[in-house]
Image (cartoon, rainbow, N blue to C red):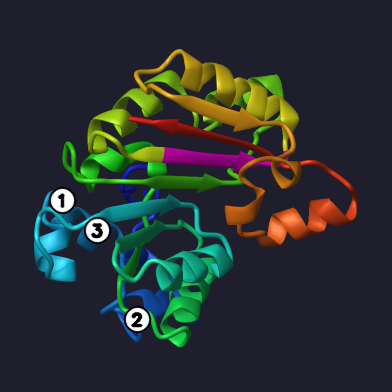
Amino acid sequence: MTPHIFGLNPTKTLPDPTYYAEALNGEFRNWAFCEERSQEFKGRWREEVFEVSKDHPMDLEIGTGNGFHFAHYAKAHPERCFIGLEIKYKPLIQSIRRAINEGSTNMRIGRFHASYLDEIFDEGELNHVIIHHPDPWPKKKQWKRRLIQDDFLEGLHRLQRPGSRVDFKTDDLPYFEWALEKFKNSKYGQLEYTFDLHNSQFASENFETHFEKIFLKKEQPIYFLRVFS
């Protein structure tokens, strides 16, 4: 039986790795971290990976997808360290490559399941967290697989520094309503949200993701919330 690391098959045990899987520990090793290496820097990402002080802001994007937002954010905020998490090899490598091609050096990416953040980050290690278009798992029997759960938010709040925020965005209304209630019942404080992102006070700062552009062409609204720790 193939061993698992918190819900993932370890990269080193893949029987027939693709170029993207090999690039994780090869060509992009200085920028990308496999499952085992991601755990090595718990509590020490700033000092040992980014070589900055403990007070330096460090943000996280959960699920980078094809990496357009990841690269945009890294370039737009050179004063902040930025870590992305992605479990699929091809978008993981695409994400870090896009950021490198933009000339950024303040970012890293890891292959790790977001349900186990406390295995790679210590209490109070994170600042802002970004979650864009996570899998909505629409069927009722799948709801337990949704990322936004009570215990996930409790753990995430513990990992963030006071005054930090979480941005959550989705094109799926039932999931947004689910997430909204979860955040309302969590330890987070100030909550702001909209059922039409592109006609809201958040529109001017929004970066349109690949998913957004698809749904905007269909005149499908995008749902957004922001909470503060």
Dot 3: what SS? helix
Estimate the spatial distance between the alpha carbons at disc 2 and disc 1, rounded to whole Å.
Answer: 20 Å
The residues colored magenta run 166-171
Q: Position of residue 143 (x, y in %)?
A: 60, 24
Q: Amino acid at mark 3?
A: Ser
Q: Magenta stretch: dominant SS?
A: strand
Task: Identify which amino acid the numbered label 2 is placed on.
Answer: Phe
- Place of residue 22 in the rendered image (x, y in percent of width and height, measured from the top left): 39, 79
Q: On the image, numbered disc 3 is attached to which residue?
A: 38
Give the residue at x 33% y 33%. 156
Front residue (pair 6, 45)? 45
Q: Is residue 144 above or below residue 113?
A: above
Q: Which residue ends up furthest to the right in the rendered image?
A: 218
Instruction: List the residue tagged with mark 2.
Output: 28
Residue, x 68% and y 20% (percent of image)?
140
Mark closer to the chain start, 3 or 2: 2
Q: Which residue is mark 1?
A: 42
Who's the residue at 24% across and 37% down the image? Answer: 159
Measure the C-alpha gap from mark 3 to mark 2: 14 Å
Q: CA distance from mark 1 to mark 3?
A: 8 Å
